[in-house]
Image: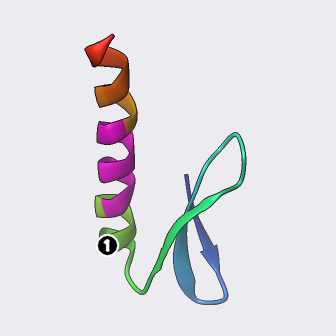
Amino acid sequence: MIKKIKGFYVVLSEKTGRRFGTYKTLAEAKKRLRQVEFFKHLKKRKR
């Protein structure tokens, strides 16, 4: 999920609240969120 905190966009885990990066623009945050989701689902496919 993406939240705006103190003027920055932060990519957070919905379950744990872990931060995956802080970005100046929403576009950068969305790009990082796509990367996180890609690798999360990649692990499930290999099983």
The residue located at (37%, 81%) in the rendering is 25
Q: Is residue 19 above or below residue 35?
A: below
* Residue lying farthest to the front in this orientation: 47
**Percent coordinates x, y for residue 28 in the rendering:** 31, 73
Amino acid carrying mark 1 in the image: Glu
SS at circle 1: helix
- In which quadrant of the rendered image does the C terminus lie? top left
Q: Quadrant of residue 32?
A: bottom left
* Residue lying farthest to the right in this orientation: 16
The mark tally for this picture is 1
The residue located at (35%, 26%) in the rendering is 43
Please tell me whether residue 6 belongs to the stretch shown in magenta: no
The residue located at (37%, 40%) in the rendering is 37
- Is residue 13 shown left or right of residue 39? right
Image colouring: rainbow
The residue located at (55%, 52%) in the rendering is 1
**Percent coordinates x, y for residue 9 in the rendering:** 51, 75
**Percent coordinates x, y for residue 36 in the rendering:** 38, 48
- Is residue 7 shown left or right of residue 36? right
Q: Which residues are magenta?
A: 32-39
- Is residue 31 shown left or right of residue 23? left
Circle 1 residue: 28
Please tell me whether residue 34 belongs to the stretch shown in magenta: yes
